[in-house]
Image: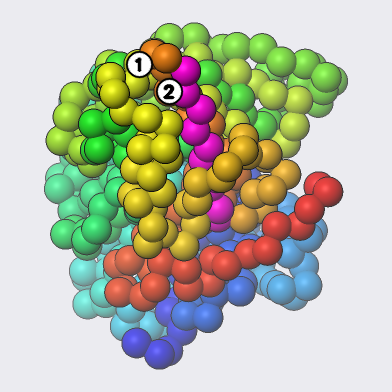
Amino acid sequence: MSESLPVIVLGGSGYVAGELLRLIATHPRLHLGAAVSTSQVDMPLATSFAHLSGVYPGAQFVSYDHAVGQLGESAQWVVLSAAPHGASAGLIDRLLSAAETANVKMAVVDTSADFRFADAAGFEAIYKQPHPAPQRLSSFRCAVPEHLAKIDTPHAAQPGCFATAMLLGIVPLLAHDLCEPEFFVSAVTGSTGAGRTPRDTTHHPLRHSNLFAYQPLKHRHQPEVRALAHDAASKPIRLHFVPQSGPFARGIHATIFARRTPAVSEEQIVAGLTEYYADSAFVSVADSPPRLKDIVGTNNAILSVAVDDETVAVCCVLDNLVKGAAGGAIQWVNRLFGWPDAEGLIIAPAGWV
């Protein structure tokens, strides 16, 4: 397919939506069809994303109904949802129904939690509300793109940003039997991970020069990671996770600890992870602990390995808004259409950010 496909972005004024818009602007096979925002209808995109004014001159946010009304303008649409958990699935369901009525094709990638669980009960247990579109669950598959060789559903879901960072380290260890299936994770995230609306835990005066844990051993990504690790490596795991809020805007630094398999050397563990990601355009294994500033703004993730007599520690850094959300979603679009993973996603790090 050589022609450019139009994209509908849902949840258009949030941080993840802003990253989706940034990535769409430089993707050779995609272009913006509609940026939907219920709070910013008819306002310029630059109202929320001044940094994108040069690539979207004159573009405005539109209503959901306006986007539905555009469906007849193309035979094929891509939908990227950055709408909130619990709202995204309902919006997607209505769009898919409208596409069926209009007899147009539609491929959807969701960055919310609504399609991360295989059944409605899994979602409802964590988010304490009925699933908005349980009849659509079987048409979505959730995974880190590097952990699924071929997608067998028409639509995809991107795991959460913390979940992505954890799974990148956990799955190859598990797949190659390099450690026992119990993992302890400490991970620090930037303030953009909490969304655009200011809160006590994200407001700059409280976040600046500060570091604190939240929801230790109770975070909602724990069951998500357990389920997706089992899907990727066909083995159950135990997981103990302490998330932390860091004094920076973008990125996640995760440290994953496990008891290493006896007689497995550090060299074998490094080789196992390196081999697992040998064909990945974005995941690499470094000789020394990775740094956030080397990946901010990109779809890259960097891992490193350290061992002692009993323990293996894997460090992982990624950009929570890109590899952990919008970039992963664009990877899934590429997969759904049979394009190279790296299409539109090779981004040089800015450095000194």
Q: Main secondary structure of the magenta part?
A: strand
In the rendering, at what x and y percent does residue 203 appear?
76, 24
Camera-side residue of 204 and 42: 204
The amino acid sitting under disc 2 is: Val
Instruction: State which quadrant residue 224 falls in.
Output: top left
Magenta span contains residue 16: no
Q: Determine which residue is flagged by label 2.
A: 312
Camera-side residue of 278 and 55: 278
309 lies left or right of 43: left
Camera-side residue of 87 and 337: 337
Is residue 101 in view?
A: yes
* Residue at horizontal 41 percent and vertical 67 percent from the top: 341
In the rendering, at what x and y percent does residue 337 appear?
31, 73
Looking at the rendered image, the quarter that the N terminus falls into is bottom left
Query: Vertical placement of 243 versus 233: above or below?
Result: above
**Residue 52 tag number:** none
* Residue at horizontal 15 percent and vertical 35 percent from the top: 234
Q: Determine which residue is flagged by label 1.
A: 259
What segment is highlighted magenta in the picture?
A: 299-308
In the rendering, at what x and y percent does residue 175 appear?
24, 38
Magenta span contains residue 303: yes
* Mark 2 neighbour class, 10 Å CA radius: few under 14, some 14 to 19, many 20 or more: many
* Mark 1 neighbour class, 10 Å CA radius: few under 14, some 14 to 19, many 20 or more: some
* Residue at horizontal 56 percent and vertical 45 percent from the top: 286
Name of the residue lying farthest toward the bottom: 2
Camera-side residue of 218 and 59: 218
> Element type at marker 1?
strand
- Alpha carbon distance from label 1 to label 2: 6 Å
Q: Are marks 1 and 2 in contact (CB under 8 Å)?
A: yes
